[in-house]
Amino acid sequence: MSAPAGARTVRRHNLGLVLRRVAAAEPVARARVAELSGLTRGTVSSLVDELLAGHLLEELEADRGVPGRPANPLRLSRSGPAALGVELNVDRARACVLDLSGAVRALRTAPSDGSAWSSPAAGLDAVAELARQVLAETGGLRAVGAVAAVAGVVDRSGVLQQAPNLPGWAGLDVGAELTARLGLDVRAGNEADLGALGELWFGGLDGVQDFLHVSGEIGVGAGIVLGGTLFGGGGGRAGELGHVVVDPGGALCRCGGRGCLEQVAGQRALLGAAGVRTVDALEAAADRGEPRALEALAVAGRALGIAVVGAVNLLDVPAVVLGGLHARLGRWLVPPIVAQLAARSRGGACPAVIVSTLGSGAAVRGAAGSVVRAVLDDPGAHLAGRAGAV
Amino acid sequence: MSAPAGARTVRRHNLGLVLRRVAAAEPVARARVAELSGLTRGTVSSLVDELLAGHLLEELEADRGVPGRPANPLRLSRSGPAALGVELNVDRARACVLDLSGAVRALRTAPSDGSAWSSPAAGLDAVAELARQVLAETGGLRAVGAVAAVAGVVDRSGVLQQAPNLPGWAGLDVGAELTARLGLDVRAGNEADLGALGELWFGGLDGVQDFLHVSGEIGVGAGIVLGGTLFGGGGGRAGELGHVVVDPGGALCRCGGRGCLEQVAGQRALLGAAGVRTVDALEAAADRGEPRALEALAVAGRALGIAVVGAVNLLDVPAVVLGGLHARLGRWLVPPIVAQLAARSRGGACPAVIVSTLGSGAAVRGAAGSVVRAVLDDPGAHLAGRAGAV
């Protein structure tokens, strides 16, 4: 006989409460969890037992050196449910496995088969192969869900609606394609959005809950976090920073417009302006002080500054995080961005410009992290076999 | 002996429910209100009696032509609480009184004493005098609150933090200044934000709940409505469209930057480029087909288009409403804005560009409307003498 709905709802709520209290304070004794959660010790013990049985928590050996009755401290399981994140970008595929604590247990990257993928199938097969490799490496963990970060606009059902930098991919249901290849539920999301969430959860932002995360690679996107959650705007696809106009008479963009940020500060544009073929070469040239490389970076930084000024005016965010390519080139890009913000700050405080410590790894971590989040947010649903993500 | 808190809370909630059901269906019989609200007839009658006694509702004469027992239909009171809205703009002051139904009962506008106000005190005195005039005109109504729409950035406490187009005004507590002058609680808000709310509540948007409202006059601002509520962004001051950069090497702006939208599409810039002194003259010249006026409008329209493209990319809104000055000049501005959006839409749907029917009257109506909204949202607080606004 099952408990009435009311009691079940309360228990489900409290399961999540206990799990998150452990996550925030681990390693932690049951008695302390009771204090932190406001639940009785008996209730906590019963909930903890369920979370232990479901492999969401694990008990550590008690510290025998401490006097008094030893209590086995609790922490999030490192050997239970795990999360798969994959990234399908223009020039690379990536896959990682996080355990419930958010620790990276395996991470692999592979370049695309050419300047972009030779076909969507080639890209999907490559990322699926990487996923199989990281899952095999972490064989003791059981992936309970997966999210794919894709370099394009993904609608709510997971279909890639627009992917100007992945020609031929629009219309593809990336989640369904990868689900079929992996035999594991895969949802798809926008790379820039998931990068911003990766930054929020795993970056070194020190509690900043409102920021614009610029996640430039070949294209230039942005994820917007407001109040600690992803801002989707009116239709769920906010943050297309790459198509903000920074030079009205400038180069023609794949979107059909002229002078989009992407045409000045995207990877292809930057390498072309600097006259080099790789980001490594660009960094080396800039390090040697080569004028053409420095000029390309100065122009890109100024353009980023102009776009960021617009975004800051429209969104009123106190911080801008440079991710991906732009994190790697942060030494050269931050000064011109700060200069634009300072010149246009109307005497008010300037937003902080922060270089991401995750760099191009933010999106794949945000992808896997959203699976972890779903488990922590509602462990009852996970235990009932209905774990969701994104 | 007062009712226990639980019952009082429920009654307060239901008071609002009944009031809003009447507002949506007026004129409406008590029995129909019971059906619409899901409350019993007895409860509705008791709540209606309280709302009648508090002058929030009024009864109409029953239609004696209808067979059966006549029921006096209910509607929002046209003679009870009223709302004062004022606007302090660079070149004018404005004041209006709305009754609870949102109908404009009085509206007055006065030009500023020069190209802008000779001093903050002159502007505050002028708007207070206008307010006294509209309140006198509607002597039978009792203003229960007031909101001032100000052409600048207003913080949450009502202090004008930045007002690049009202030199010398920054730091002024406009709400407190007007409260002292009028003996009526006045709160202050940003003109562009209140314009967007005016558009949402009183404009002809036909249910559109997500839009960018461009409210240009001397400056160019915007209010952003998402999901039917005002979007404040990270810090509450989102929507500074006027300082989005549309021409990086362009004219110096009061904000310290170059090429801000305001320097191309603001009123001063437009009149200067067209070589005329007033908006009337600009309209007349454009109507006559004078090339310089048409060129100025085309340049402004293109700049607005570039800024709007950026905002649409960042906010993903399906509609853009041109208000204020730009509504008046909509005939000439809409085509170049639509052209920019279409050129840069990446094959997706283009946001609609709508010309406001309220024009420069949106802000003062949004200001008064937010007082009306506060009463409708929580009539119990109003009846207890704690009516709030904004």
Image: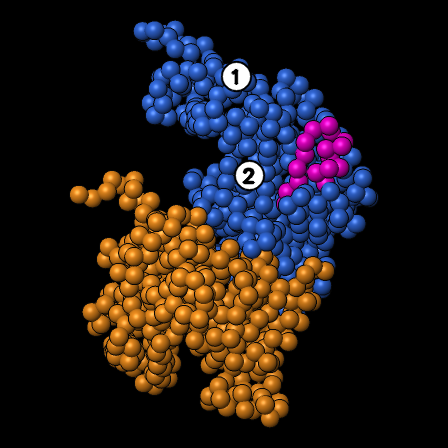
Chain colours: A blue, B orange
Q: Nearer the viewer, residue B335 or B307?
A: B335
Whole-percent x and y of residue B244?
Answer: 52, 65
The quadrant the C terminus of chain A occupies is top right
Query: Label 1 is placed on what type of residue?
Result: Met
Chain assignment, label 2 = A
Whole-percent x and y of residue A133?
Answer: 72, 26
Q: Is residue A95 found left or right of B43 in the rendered image? A: right
Label 2 belongs to which residue? A198
Whole-percent x and y of residue B383?
Answer: 26, 57
Q: Are marks 1 and 2 on the same chain?
A: yes
Q: CA distance from mark 1 to mark 2?
A: 42 Å
Residue A306's label in the rendered image is none
Q: Is residue A94 visible?
A: yes
Q: Quick one: label 1 or label 2, which is nearer the N terminus?
A: 1
Label 1 belongs to which residue? A1
Q: Is residue B110 above or below residue B290?
A: above
Q: Is residue B189 found left or right of A317 in the rendered image? A: left
Q: Nearer the viewer, residue A248 or B80?
A: B80
- The residue at 26%/41% (across/down) is B5
Chain assignment, label 1 = A
Query: Label 2 is placed on what type of residue?
Result: Gly
Contact check, label 1 and label 2, Cβ < 8 Å: no
Q: SS class of the residue under badge 1? A: loop
- The residue at 76%/32% (across/down) is A180
- The residue at 79%/49% (across/down) is A168
Range of the magenta residues?
A174-190
Q: Does residue A301 show up magenta in the picture?
A: no
